[in-house]
């Protein structure tokens, strides 16, 4: 690689590292705050919160890197122009196509980073995150069984436990299920135990009573029937309270790209997805690394338009940002279309193709020779 290419590439990589660090920190902190509130409210420790936020970090990085590449490219080109280095390169005979070579190399390097993340690191992190979420969902005591306070796991259900013994026994248990206004059930027990089974957690009530209040035909002014049943031992399914009554479906993002391109029956059954949806996820991963070179070239090519101005290149920067917004908006629209109909997955490559065409058009305009402005002679002047 020529020395001038290495110089431009080193400048872009330095700026890219700084902007990537700043943007990832902002996105990650925003995500970490929401996870912190959710997990701490469920009774989890700070180590669990740190683990969950770390597992979401690869996905955040893969989203932020193309934006960081655009920012580094635009800022680096602006600095080269303001310090007259870009003007010196052009005066030496380097065309916009030649100047774009190190920028394209920079974009490809960032695209390789994104490809490594979306094809290897993100599926691994999502798989680990799904396993940890399943483990925490099974830990009902840590999720919502707390002593000395009324709990509302779902709408219409009230839960109260006087105390939790050291061996895990729930003392003086109270549960009211009023999700059906015409059939309200109240469970009380001296003690209760939480047992983990293959089909989800089960609650075993010991020495208690069930009160069932039925209102016939929904007429509250009419006669109601109250039945009382005493028991020594009663099993209660906690699946309706924890959301684990049905088998948890794995996330498509936890599977490698190769399996998603040719999904088998086991993958479709585990995720509850379709062949089109799995292939759409795979092609979304394949198209995501293409965003990085497109974003880098947009930030560079737009700043080559126009001549020298004492007011800087702020107009070109605005056009570059608008072009990036257009490509991002197109990507969002394509994702919505694919979400409605997964068989439209070829549209995933449309934003990168449109962005590439915009870059080629801008470089062609920048390389096109400009005609000098001809001043009209004054009236009455001779040639």
Image: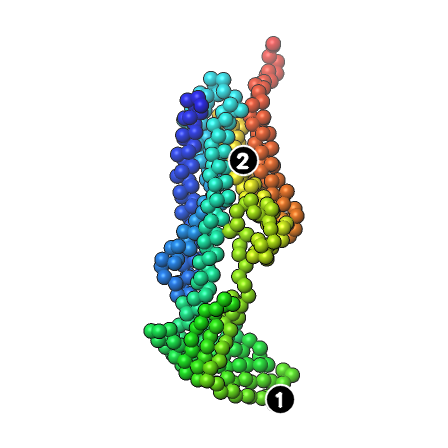
Q: Which residue ends up furthest to the bottom in the rendered image?
A: 223
Indicate left or right for 57 with 222 as reference: left
> Residue 255: x and y, percent?
52, 50
Nearest the viewer among 112 and 362 is: 112
At mark 1, the secondary structure is: loop
Instruction: Please report the residue visible at 44 percent of the width from the left and 81 percent of the height from the top.
Output: 206
Residue 23's tag is: none
> Residue 137: x and y, percent?
46, 64
Compared to residue 192, the image places residue 26 above or below, namely above
Instruction: Please report the residue visible at 50 percent of the width from the left and 66 percent of the height from the top.
Output: 198
* N-term mark: 1 or 2: 1
Circle 1 packing at 10 Å, graded few (<14), some (14-19), many (20+), is: few
Quarter occupied by residue 12: top left
- Label 1 belongs to which residue? 222
- Label 2 belongs to which residue? 294
Instruction: Please report the residue visible at 35 percent of the width from the left and 75 percent of the height from the top.
Output: 165
Compared to residue 58, the image places residue 372 above or below, namely above
Circle 2 packing at 10 Å, graded few (<14), some (14-19), many (20+), is: many
């Amino acid at each position: 690689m020529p020395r001038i290419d290495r110089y431009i590439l080193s400048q872009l990589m330095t700026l890219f590292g700084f902007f990537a660090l700043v943007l990832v920190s902002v996105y990650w902190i925003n995500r970490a705050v929401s996870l912190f509130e959710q997990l701490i409210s469920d009774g989890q420790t700070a180590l669990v919160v740190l683990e969950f936020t770390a597992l979401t970090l690869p996905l955040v990085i893969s989203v932020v890197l193309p934006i960081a590449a655009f920012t580094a490219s635009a800022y680096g080109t602006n600095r080269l122009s303001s310090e007259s280095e870009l003007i010196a390169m052009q005066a030496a005979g380097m065309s916009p196509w030649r100047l774009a070579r190190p920028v394209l190399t920079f974009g490809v390097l960032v695209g390789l980073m994104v490809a490594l993340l979306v094809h290897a690191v993100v599926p691994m992190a999502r798989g680990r995150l799904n396993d940890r979420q399943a483990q925490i969902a099974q830990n009902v005591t840590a999720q919502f069984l707390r002593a000395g306070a009324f709990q509302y796991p779902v709408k219409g259900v009230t839960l109260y436990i006087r105390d939790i013994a050291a061996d895990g026994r729930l003392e003086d248990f109270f549960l009211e299920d009023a999700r059906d206004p015409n059939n309200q059930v109240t469970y009380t027990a001296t003690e209760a135990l939480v047992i983990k089974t293959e089909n989800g957690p089960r609650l075993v009530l010991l020495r208690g009573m069930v009160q069932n209040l039925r209102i016939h035909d929904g007429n509250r002014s009419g006669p109601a029937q109250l039945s009382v049943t005493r028991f020594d031992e009663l099993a209660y399914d906690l699946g309706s309270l924890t959301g684990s009554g049905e088998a948890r479906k794995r996330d498509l993002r936890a599977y490698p790209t190769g399996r998603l391109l040719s999904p088998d029956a086991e993958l479709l059954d585990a995720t509850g997805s379709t062949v089109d949806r799995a292939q759409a996820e795979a092609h979304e991963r394949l198209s995501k690394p293409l965003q990085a070179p497109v974003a880098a070239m947009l930030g560079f090519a737009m700043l080559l338009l126009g001549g020298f101005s004492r007011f800087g290149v702020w107009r070109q920067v605005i056009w570059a940002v608008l072009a990036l917004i257009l490509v991002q908006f197109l990507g969002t629209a394509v994702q919505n279309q694919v979400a409605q109909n997964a068989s439209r997955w070829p549209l995933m490559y449309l934003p990168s193709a449109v962005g590439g065409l915009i870059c080629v058009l801008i470089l062609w305009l920048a390389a096109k020779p400009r005609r000098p402005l001809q001043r009209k002679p004054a009236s009455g002047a001779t040639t």
